[in-house]
Structures are given as structure tokens and as C-alpha cells.
Image (cartoon, rainbow, N blue to C red):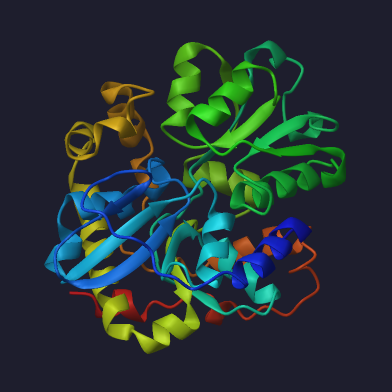
Amino acid sequence: MSKKMWVALAAAAALSLSGCASTASQSGGTSSSGGSGTPVSIMVGGLNKQIYLPFMLAQRLGYYQQQGLNVTLQDEGAGVDATTNMVAGKVDGVGGFYDHTIAMQGLGQSMESVISMLTTPGEVELCRNDLKGKIKSPADWAGKNLGITDIGSSTDFLTQFLAQKNGVDPASIHRIGVQSGSTLIGAMQHGNVDCAMTTEPTVSTLLATGSAYILLDMRTASGTTQQLGGEYPATSLYMSTAYVNQHPDVVQKLVNAYVATLKWIQAHNGTQLADVMPADYYAGSGKAAYAKAFDNEKGIYNLTGIMPPSGPPTDLKVLQAFNPDVKGKTIDLTKTYTDKFVQASK
């Protein structure tokens, strides 16, 4: 974790612990399932990204209300900032990459994933089309401007690891926070970044316009193993260990909703999904492209919600390669996730 993130966490901890406002419809990056159920607030590192699909999909399918929950989803451009808000007590949980629980343990913060939703990162490294032939692999990254969601984000972790793995000192690359969607697309099209790590539907949008080409693809198990050396569990719902211990009934209801959502994903295709999701989720790429992107990467979603046993060590290996807050420290992976709620789900 970067110095910037540590400063952000410290600053956030000093903020008031006021709760999150609940709204009845999607507005201003906030969406509530409504109803009179138990209130729960979750901040997601990019609600419209397909890698975080289960969070909004569970709401659209009514699964939160079925569990007696009134879940407020807040949109945040980067998982690192969502984690900061949870540390400050402003949200109850985070929809983000599992690797943050490892990084935070290195800083003395106890957080745990309560359900695993992706068995691969679903990330794609795109480069500007005018650089084709000049950037053929991460070995060509020295001195280049590389787009990530934000400093301290999972895309930052992965970008630095890939650079180092390919013989490039992470200090020699320029990592620039461009989030995703329109901001990342603008940065790419205006030449502010040479390459960028992103997900669907942004990938399809850039490929359709001819603005970029794929340098590497981690939307499949084989692609992930090739780049990272093994399975890399990504999207999860993670919460502070204190919250999990104090509210096991609420956590169980959330997990029940997400297990049902993961089953729905496996039983439906992209067209059926697009019919359920808000129209602005595919406004940039188009409904047909959104549906096709889902069908192409459907294999990224966890079939059961159980953490892949071989996954956490891969996440740890990536962080220990370069992250000073994890490197050289003893990390107890058994405390970074739990499967008990998934196993108890009906």
C-alpha cells in the first residue's frame, strides 16, 4: 500500500462516523434496495463494472429485500477509496478485490472477505493503437504512462507486479489514476496514458472505437495463471472483522443474497442480464456489446462463493513482490477470508 493510501486512511479515520444516506432509486452514485429491512451500506469500487456485477444485480433481482435487508450501494471509482471509507466507519462493507484484506492486515487492520465472487481479476491491459509494435509486453513499460484506477488500488498492485515480473523496475513506470469508463477512455484517446488496466464494459468500448489493442488478458483462468502464476480471487464482499463478529445475522443474509445472485448469473445469458440492469450501465458500449462482453467473460464468476483454496497464496505472492506494507511481513491468510457464511447459505 502506498504512502498516499496510508495518509488517506489516517485522514478518513478522523472524519465523523455519520451514516450513509439512503435513496429509493439510483441517483448520484447511490442506490438503495428500499423497504423497511435492516439497513446496510456497501461501497463498491465501480458499480457499473461487470467485475462488480453481483452487487447491483442482487438489488435489481430483489434479493436484498427477500432477505429482509435495505442495502444502500454507493459507487466509488477505486476500491482503495472504498476501503478508506469503511475504515472511517462511513460504510459497513466494501465490494472490491480480496487483495485489499491482505494489504490492510499488513497495516494492522483486520478485514475479511465473506464471499468470493470472482476467481480471476477480469482485468485487461489495453494500449493505444498507435503504439502497436512498440509495446509488445510489460517488458516495454519502462518510462511509460500506465493508467490504473488509483494509487493503492488493485490495478495498481497488479500493474507493479507485472512490471517487476517482466524485468521492469516499478519505480520506472508512471502510474496514473484514471478510474474507469469515460475518464479512462478520455485519458487513452487524448494520449495521457500509453496503456491502462480496465474491465468490461470499458474494454469493449475502446476496442469498438479502434482506440486500443489488448496487451494481456486476465479474463480467463489460463490468462490469469500465465500472468500471475495461479488463481487470483478478486471481487468479494469484505468487511471489518469487528463488524462480522458483531453482526453475523446481517452478514449471513447478505451472503445468502449473493449466493443466489451467483446462481442466477450461471443460469442466464448476456441479453437476459442487460434486460435487468440499468440502461446507463451499457450506455457507452451499447446494450448488445454489453451482453456480448458478459457472455465472453462469464467464466470469471465464482460458481459457489467459496474462496478458491489455491487463490489467496497467489494474491499474497503478488503483494509481497513489491508492496512495502506486505513485503517481509507475516500475513495470516486464514484471517483474511471466511467461508462459513457461504457454507451456511440456503
Q: Is residue 68 visible?
A: yes
**Which of 304 and 2 lies nearest the eye of the viewer?**
2
Viewer-side residue, 1 vs 135? 1
Task: Inspect this view and state whether residue 303 appears.
Answer: no
Q: Position of residue 7 (x, y in %)?
A: 73, 63
Of residue 3 and residue 304, the one placed in the foreground of this image is 3
- Report which quarter residue 249 is drawn in: bottom left
Callout count: 0
Residue at the image point whose x is 46% and y is 68% from the top: 90
- Say left or right for 160 vs 37: right
- Residue at point 78% right, 68% down? 327
Measured along the vertical axis of the image, is residue 63 above or below residue 306?
A: above
Relative vertical location of residue 193 with respect to residue 223 in this rendering, above or below:
above
Position of 56 with respect to 168 (left or right) is left
Residue pictured at 68% horizontal, 11% vertical = 130
Give the residue furthest to the bottom.
246
Location of residue 283 in the rendering, given as x and y in whole percent from the top left corner:
33, 25
Q: Position of residue 244 (x, y in %)?
A: 40, 82
> Where's the N terminus, which quadrant?
bottom right
Give the quarter of the figure containing the C terminus. Answer: bottom left
Q: Position of residue 185 (x, y in %)?
A: 54, 24
In the image, residue 229 above or below residue 106:
above
Q: Relative to the observer, which residue lies in front, 313 or 71?
A: 71
